[in-house]
Image (cartoon, rainbow, N blue to C red):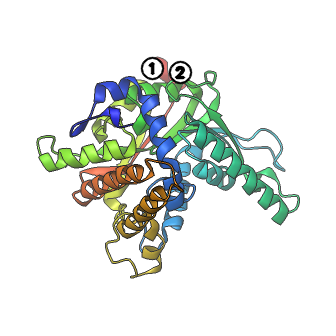
Amino acid sequence: YHKYENGKSVNQTKAKKKYTDMVNKYYDLATSFYEYAWGDCFHFAHRLKGETLRESIKRHEHFLASKFTSGLPKPKHGGKGARPRVLDVGCGIGGPAREISSFCGVDVTGLNNNAYQVDRARDITQKKRDAAKAAIAGAPPAVLGNCEFVKGDFMKMPFPDNHFDAAYAIEATCHAPKAEDIYKEMLRVVKPGGRVAIYEWCLTDKYDPKNESHKLFKHQIEIGNGLPDIRTTKQCKDAMAKAGWQVVEDIDLASCSPVPWYEPLYPTQGYFSSLEALSSIKSSPIGAKVTHGFCWLLESLRLAPKGTTRVSSVLQQGAIGLIDGGKIDAFTPMYLLVGRKPTSAAAKK
């Protein structure tokens, strides 16, 4: 993985050319650490005061779903008929897909190019379905949710044109080598009139490319999170329009979050100040140091694979960059972009 690092920056030419290799190597290394600290949803969230991390993550997913579910076809009376098909681009281990499928009553297809994460998504989903069926005898699919997971490159999706009613991505398309190309591919597989909603990782207008401390946090985020580069909010918005989407809405949700989005990594009110602070202690600096210490011990005793401690160090480096970028509002992990695919008539106009 470190072959993509070039001194104090990511080798962007190499990383963009071999983005699938870079991202796959990163998630092969990082997934177990993510799952330990974050559960099955690997993303930040707009957070209200008094909310636990888990509560904010669910609400963040529901809010995103509200942006692409309006206007979706609904099953006939009694739940009969086909349910809307929605694509999750870069689905991780399936946490958001399971939540959105169950909450919105849609069928979700999760696309992921990492074989380990696809296997975990399928395994967790099956176990949750088995547990739900046992608890709720005869529960309909709308209650349990309906998800499937496909291994594939999101730059070359293994789906026909106009296949999905809508699509979304949560902190995933930032791994694409070129924003316009991933947006074009999403446009191809969504039906005319369908919507896409995306949470993007972006640099804000407060980022100064000439400032050394800004360049440092950008590099730390890139190498610590498997990114070939970080785009600006303007670049992402322009790319969506150039790809052919009608841009319906864009907003940086980090700018209006009552609790800083980086709170799970750096509790601003102290670790034991409240229930919500305690809920994210695993992902905090103290939690990271304890985990790092255990990794070193287990690796020294040969109970963990060689290199485990180094992986922990890479993730800590990424966390430091996220905190530093977040504190000065120069980086956001929740720039919301909502687009609508034009109908044939609209496209001609």
Labels in figure, total: 2
Q: Is residue 73 visible?
A: yes
Residue sitting at x 47%, y 79%: 275
Height in image: 327 above or below 233? below
Q: Position of residue 133 (x, y in %)?
A: 82, 58
- Residue 34 point in image, percent of width and height: 49, 54
Residue 264 left/right relative to 321: right
Residue that lies at the very extreme toward the right in this rendered image = 138
* Mark 2 lies on residue: 345
Between 278 and 205, which is closer to the camera in this rendering?
A: 278
Q: Which amino acid type is marked by label 2?
A: Ala
Toward the top, the furthest residue is 348
Badge 2 element: helix
Q: Rounded to the nearest whole Å, what is the CA distance between mark 2 and mark 1? A: 7 Å
Q: Quadrant of the N terminus?
A: top left
To which residue does mark 1 refer?
349
Q: To which quarter of the image does residue 285 belong?
A: bottom left
Locate residue 252 relative to residue 47 in the image: left or right. Answer: left
Toward the viewer: 29 or 344? 29
Q: In the current view of this chain or complex, which residue is farthest to the bottom? A: 273
**With 40 as the anchor, is 267 left or right in this view?**
left
For the question of whether residue 339 can be seen, the reply is no
Q: Residue at x 18, y 48 (%)?
A: 214
Name the secondary structure under disc 1.
Answer: loop
Disc number for residue 272: none
Q: Nearer the viewer, residue 109 or 21?
A: 21
Q: Amino acid at mark 1?
A: Lys
Place residue 256 in its image quadrant: bottom left
Do the residues under discs 2 and 1 have CB atoms within 8 angstroms? Answer: yes
Q: Position of residue 73 (x, y in %)?
A: 69, 40
